[in-house]
Amino acid sequence: MRHDLDIPSDFSIEQNADQSAMLVRARGTLSDESLRKLKPALEELEASLDHPSILFDIRDVTDFSGLSARFVREMAQSDEWSRCHDGQRSRRAVVVSSTGLYGLGRLYQLSTGSSEDESLKLFRDVRGALEYVGFLAESESETASGSPGADPTT
């Protein structure tokens, strides 16, 4: 992981072992401004990793009153992530814990047109999302539910 990126404090980013997927966690407040600040770092990291799949885990967001539907639509419609790279779309997943966040995720999904091609999926179950974007190695995916040790789902 590059340490020279300017990542807002309410976010953390992890990469899987082969750098084919990223896990982006948000906690606390999620707003138009915080996403504006995060986007350049994510775009730079994504480009340097040859467009990995990304899981956005927003289960720990406690306040999203500063996140407007208008901004979500604008971000989705201008989002490089929703486009194809080398003829292939990278997978995107969003894990939510509340109905309100699910609604905003669904708005983003519909605004990108991803609901038709399934390049972006919404989840309430983090395990399914990790598997969908390929964050876990195949052996981890098969054994992680009962094995001790580091668990990216916590």
Image (tube, rainbow, N blue to C red):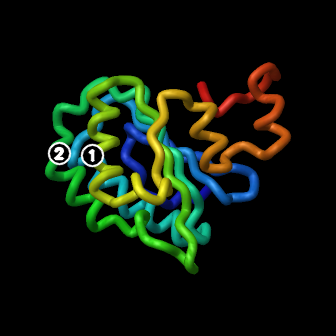
Left or right: residue 79 compared with residue 149: left
* Residue at the image point whose x is 63% and y is 31% from the top: 127
Task: Name, please, the residue furthest toward the front.
Answer: 116
Tell me the residue that label 2 is attached to: 69
Residue 64 position in % (x across, y down) = 24, 32
* Residue at the image point whose x is 20% and y is 41% from the top: 67
* Residue at the image point whose x is 77% and y is 28% from the top: 144
* Residue at the image point whose x is 46% and y is 52% from the top: 120
Q: Nearer the viewer, residue 139 or 9?
A: 139
Could you say whether the residue bearing mark 2 is in a helix, strand or loop? helix
Could you say whether the residue bearing mark 1 is in a helix, strand or loop? helix
Badges 2 and 1: C-beta atoms under 8 Å apart?
yes
Residue 79 position in % (x across, y down) = 34, 65
144 is higher (above) or lower (below) than 79? above
Tell me the residue that label 1 is attached to: 107
Q: Quadrant of residue 136?
A: top right
Q: Quadrant of residue 81?
A: bottom left
Instruction: Check disc 1 and give the amino acid type.
Output: Leu
Task: Name, please, the residue furthest toward the bottom.
Answer: 86
Left or right: residue 54 compared with residue 114: right
Residue 88 position in % (x across, y down) = 57, 72
Residue 69 position in % (x across, y down) = 17, 45
Quarter holding the N terminus is bottom right
* Closer mark to the observer between disc 2 and disc 1: 1
